[in-house]
Amino acid sequence: MVKLKGASPFDEPVGKLRESDPEEVAGRTGAKWLPVGEGAGEGDLVVPVLEGEIVVNFPAVSLEATPGLDSFTLKLLTLLYLCNSDGMPPSGSWVAYREVPGGRFYEPVVARSIEDPLARAFGSNPGEFVRAAETVGGSIERFGDAACSFALFPLVPVCFIIWRSDEEFGARAQVLFDSNCDRHLDAFNLRMGAQEISSRLISGHQVGSVP
């Protein structure tokens, strides 16, 4: 579909969802459908996002987010996830971004905008990374010097690893994705989701560091 100049990126997913059965959407995405009244297709689709929820009201397909999640990116990604997810559960196997279909093209951007800033922020103190991650719904993983995974959406886990700096090597960070993540979002949107998480981690760390 050719997008008209000036069209909002929300238009296409909103239009698609308005033609969808919200109960079916909930069933394949891990969201919760809460019907309202007796009208078919009227109600709220509650989507777990990181540490909170984004609620999509049907049939209008308007969005409400819990405090801290009211961002352009997360709202758009929520709609795209609901439209595109095929319901495949996570495999439990982590892959680097370059192994995600289409990921090699954006790999330098991921290093520059996600991994390098995380290494600079937390490489000298990986424990601070864990504390920051806990405020964004992170779960501890056993990789590197510190690692945490996040449920960007119910079927889209994302993991960040930190290696501390030492006398021989500089600090390093890496983002990993479940090998089935591309069944729900494409490489570009997975990058956007990971960057949203990393930005929140760094912002929370900087605020916490202020005397």
Image: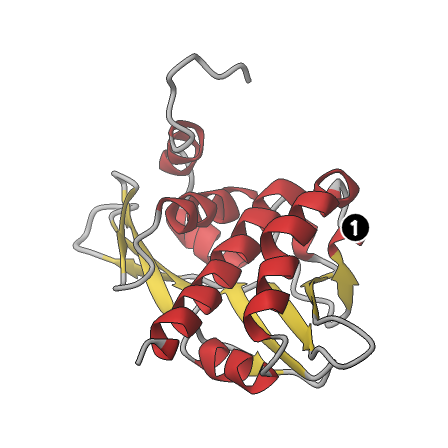
Pointer 1: what residue? 98
Query: In this rendering, would 205 be left or right of 189?
Result: left
Label 1 secondary element: helix
Q: Position of residue 136 (x, y in %)?
A: 43, 73
Query: In this rendering, would 48 be left or right of 38?
Result: right
Of residues 90 and 23, the one drawn nearer to the viewer in this rendering: 90
Q: Quadrant of the C terminus?
A: bottom left
Q: What is the residue that sits farthest to the left in this orientation?
A: 37
Mark 1 Cα within 10 Å, few/some/many (few <14, many 20+)?
some
Figure label count: 1
Q: Is residue 85 visible?
A: no
What colour scheme does the image use?
A: secondary structure
Q: Residue at x 49, y 77 (%)?
A: 133
Q: Position of residue 43 (x, y in %)?
A: 25, 53
The kind of residue tagged 1 is Arg
Q: Residue at x 77, y 69 (%)?
A: 93
Residue 159 vertical placement versus 98 (above, below): below
Query: In this rendering, would 12 be left or right of 174?
Result: left
Q: Is residue 3 visible?
A: yes
Q: Residue at x 66, y 56 (%)?
A: 181
Q: Quadrant of the N terminus?
A: top right
Residue 189 vertical placement versus 174 (above, below): above
Of residues 166 and 184, the one drawn nearer to the viewer in this rendering: 166
